[in-house]
Image: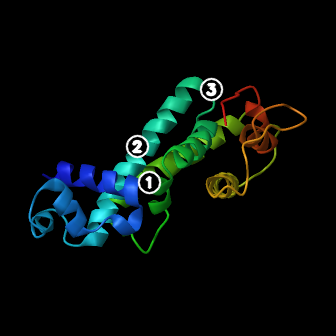
């Protein structure tokens, strides 16, 4: 029943956005009484946090798909972030909503923290071939993640269009990443 509730919550999210995901709506879509979901989720926040855990796992599956194409795992995380945000805007949007998600939930927090540490290790590995110089890998990770998140949000709102870099001919995101991750410039995923 828990999987059914989460599956229906995901379908509602895709159709109506975060405001449409309520305990009652999920119960109705699941064909159960409005009280039945309480056996699995104490309240809407717990439902949304469980949904965000599922969504983050879907994003990580996209990371693996990108990594199968790209030689650089750190870059795969970033390309997957953009790809996922464009393919699933409502799913992507709730991942960053502290008003909807319990960021103290140990299951959600562990999934996010494990992924973030893997991302940082991947960045550190990709920098091992870069010119020497002391850098805080977490600062680089924050800069890259923030840039891709911002670019993705601006693309989702229609403020930016999909364009290619006029110098390299690469999709804009690929060109931006190459500026900051020059050691991985040969990877050319689609934007």
Going by the image, does 119 lie left or right of 189?
left
Of pointers 3 and 2, the one earlier in the residue sequence: 2
Gap in Å between the C-alphas at discs 3 and 2? 21 Å
Give the residue drawn at x 22%, y 61%. Answer: 26
Gap in Å between the C-alphas at discs 2 and 1? 10 Å
Quadrant where the C terminus sits is top right
Q: Position of residue 44 (x, y in %)?
A: 27, 71
184 or 79: nearer the viewer: 79
Pointers 2 and 1 in contact (CB under 8 A)? Answer: yes
Of pointers 2 and 1, the one earlier in the residue sequence: 2
Give the residue drawn at x 77%, y 41%. Answer: 163
Q: Residues within 10 Å of mark 1 (few under 14, many from 20)?
A: many
Give the colour scheme of this rendering.
Answer: rainbow
Residue 159, compared with residue 59, is above or below; it is below
Q: Residues within 10 Å of mark 2 (few under 14, many from 20)?
A: some
Residue under circle 3? 71
Q: Position of residue 132 (x, y in %)?
A: 81, 41
- Can you see residue 129? no
Residue under circle 2? 58
Residue under circle 1? 91
Q: Secondary structure at mark 2?
A: helix
Going by the image, does 162 lie left or right of 21?
right
């Amino acid at each position: 029943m828990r999987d059914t509730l989460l599956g229906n919550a995901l379908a509602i999210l895709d159709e109506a956005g975060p405001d449409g995901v309520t305990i009652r709506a999920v119960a109705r879509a699941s064909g159960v009484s409005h009280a039945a979901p309480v056996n699995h989720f104490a309240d809407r926040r717990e439902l949304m946090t469980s949904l965000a855990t599922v969504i983050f796992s879907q994003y990580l599956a996209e990371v693996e798909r990108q990594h199968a194409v790209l030689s650089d795992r750190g870059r795969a995380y970033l390309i997957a972030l953009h790809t996922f945000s464009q393919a699933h805007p409502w799913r992507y949007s709730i991942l960053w909503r502290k008003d909807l998600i319990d960021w103290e939930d140990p299951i959600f927090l562990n999934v996010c923290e494990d992924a973030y540490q893997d991302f940082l290790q991947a960045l550190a590995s990709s920098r091992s071939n870069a010119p020497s110089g002391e850098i805080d890998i977490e600062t680089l990770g924050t800069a890259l993640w923030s840039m891709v998140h911002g670019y993705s949000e601006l693309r989702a709102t229609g403020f930016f269009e999909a364009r290619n870099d006029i110098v390299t001919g690469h999709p804009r995101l690929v060109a931006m990443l190459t500026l900051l991750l020059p050691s991985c410039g040969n990877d050319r995923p689609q934007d």
